[in-house]
Amino acid sequence: MAKELEAISKQILEKITPKEEEYAKVEALSRELEQKITLECQREGVAATVRVEGSIAKDTWLSGNPDIDVFMRLPTSIPRKNLGDVGLKIAKKAAGNAKQLERFAEHPYLQIFLDGYKVDIVPCYDAKSGEWQSATDRTPYHTNYIRARLDKQLRGDVRLLKKFMQGIGVYGAEIKVGGFSGYLCELLIMKYGSFEATLHAFAKYNKRVVIDIEGFYAERENEISLLFPEPLVIVDPVDKGRNVASAVQPQKLYEFIGASRAFLENPSETFFYPPKPEVLSTKALENQLEKCGSTVVFLVIGELNAVPDVLWGQLYRSKRSLRTMLELNDFKVLKDAVWRSEKATSVFMFELEAQVLPNIKKHLGPPLEREAECVKYLAKYAGNEQVISGPYIEDGRWMVELPRKTPDAAALLREKLADGGKNAGVADLIAEAIKENLRVLVNGEVVEVYEGNADFTVFLSGFLSGKPFWLNP
């Protein structure tokens, strides 16, 4: 098995390592942009250091997928509120006629498309180590740290780890993905020494992983537990107060663990290059929804306008709140998800054990030892006409059986979302979209969204299957 893993890794590495021609093209483009941005900084009278950062600078990028990041390290005298505007003004002039998109993370930055490449031009402060004024100030320090410690072999292992994570869907620190960043991959390879060793380490995962490469918290385990409660903690070597893995959602960590075990058991190129997903035909979808025994309720809303990280943060927050609301009303949620097209549709989906509950529910009262509470409970329910049965004593406490107000999950969602759902914990942007246009669909009714939307057909087919591709023989 070890030989098979080694052979596959070698084949993949050959494919994903940039060739000389690609290196030369990316290098020329990067240097040209550096010079143009430096010149615009001088014209604007802004003293700045301009440098390519990220995977290009660290030589850990994948062939055909270079993340070109050009950073402007601006003077700390520029007010924080003006950093993005100053950076955008310079970046737009330097970009010239290239296609431009304003993006926003912690502050605005410019994304351009030039000669078939995507380039991010990002402002940050020329800050001293530890004196960060924006999240991007650390990036040049990250670049320097990694470049000094990764040799050619380790850079190859980083590429393998990145490609593996891309293949299984856990790569990317943006909120939509909630996965592993490139810098995190580099630190993992530094820690464990190879791609294979990293997979073996995570295959043996036991509740929590803590990596402190620089030993900031040596013999201070209690302190690190208080500072970083997450299941995966990688202390940033250039900032001991930051967990590099804080953006990794537990689900993505667990998927990486499961896929690592599966790959080590049965190495295959499909982990790096997933097969085309199987998609249910409309008829097959209807049959599966009808026969599976559970019920899937879909909330379909219209256009949402916001930067991706803000939007996905609100989508996920709203999904959690809606799931909680369903569960508090005694509906058992088997699994849930949210999908959004790049156009104008977002869909929340909740698979329920049952859509309709019995018309009666048990309402637990206080235990008998709480005499005063028992008196109040009996005063409220002993003569209440709504009580179907009780009050009676069971297992040492009073209880009654009451009619359920809304036994249908779809009806409950329509009721709770009639005003946008803010009282149900729905985030502001989502609440406004719900007010404008909300459809609550059950099982086969979703066909109207499914047909003609290729991305949604892939997503929903995968949601219903529930089985990751890497578990297939």
Image (cartoon, grey):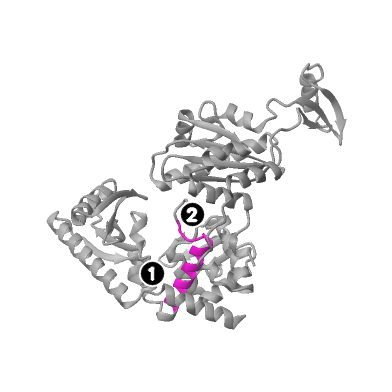
For the residue marked with disc 2, what is the amino acid?
Answer: Val
Where does the image place residue 26, in percent across and percent down from the top left? 29, 69
Where does the image place residue 309, in percent across and percent down from the top left? 42, 48
Kindly report the secondary structure that dominates the magenta region of the rendered protein: helix
Residue indicated by mark 1: 61
Q: Residue at x 23, y 57 (%)?
A: 75
Q: Is residue 78 visible?
A: no
Q: Is residue 158 above or below residue 298?
A: below
Q: Residue at x 56, y 39 (%)?
A: 447
Where does the image place residue 246, in percent across and percent down from the top left? 49, 57
Q: Is residue 265 above or below residue 400?
A: below
Q: Quadrant of residue 287?
A: top right
In-image side of 80 versus 36 (left or right) = right
The residue nearer to you, when weighing 426 against 299, is: 299
Q: CA distance from mark 1 to mark 2?
A: 19 Å
Picture mark count: 2
Query: Which sits earlier in the primary sequence, circle 1 or circle 2?
Result: 1
In-image side of 345 versus 290 (left or right) = left
Residue 416 painted magenta: no
Q: Quadrant of residue 391?
A: top right
The residue nearer to you, when weighing 124 against 446, is: 446
Q: Residue at x 54, y 63 (%)?
A: 275
Q: Which residues are magenta?
A: 154-173
Q: Is residue 369 visible?
A: yes
Q: Residue at x 31, y 72 (%)?
A: 22
Q: Which mark is residue 177?
A: 2
